[in-house]
Amino acid sequence: MKLIFTNFEQLSGLKINYHKSELYCFGDAKQMQDNYVGIFGCQVAETPFTYLGIPLHHKRISNKDWKVIEDRFERRLSTWKSKLLSYGGRLTLINSVLSNLSVYMLFFFEIPKEVLKKLDFFISRFFWQGDGHKRK
């Protein structure tokens, strides 16, 4: 196994830093985990973990794993910003947030209905709240 990484290092000219690396074992590899730690000398890590902003797991990610996305979504669409923007400005901000956050996640996972309802709630609250003095 280590021979593969040694060949990679020789061919690419890159050096693997095993002290910064983490080992993830699934299924049958879990039984050999201690052997792998001895071979590579890296730390054992658990799932789910985040890679490029996406929570990864060997199983389907749960609703609680989507909480990070919901929080990020709500932070970007905070209601205080809506009071300063026109309808067009709010719509543009909503579209930019949607295209950057949720669509990126949807490339990898199917969004649960409960999470989708929350994201819709954040969007509608942001869009329709606007100026607090006007009735909507």
Image: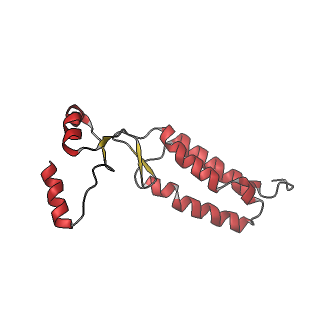
12 lies above or below 69: below
Residue drawn 55% across the image and 40% down it = 114
Q: Is residue 15 left or right of residue 97?
A: left
Tell me residue 65's x, y (percent).
Answer: 48, 41
Query: Residue most toward the top?
Result: 31
- How many badges with numbers are in the image? 0
Q: Is residue 110 left or right of residue 123?
A: left
Query: Residue most toward the right?
Result: 133
Tell me residue 17's x, y (percent).
Answer: 28, 54
Residue drawn 19% across the image and 34% down it = 32
Quadrant assignment, res 92: bottom right
Tell me residue 133's x, y (percent).
Answer: 87, 55
Asked whether 25 or 34 is in front, the reply is 34
State how the image is colored: secondary structure
Q: Is residue 124 left or right of residue 96?
A: right
Residue drawn 85% across the image and 56% down it = 134
Asked whether 93 or 25 is in front, the reply is 25
Tell me residue 25's x, y (percent).
Answer: 27, 39
118 lies above or below 16: above
Residue drawn 59% across the image and 63% down it = 95
Q: Is residue 101 left or right of residue 132?
A: left
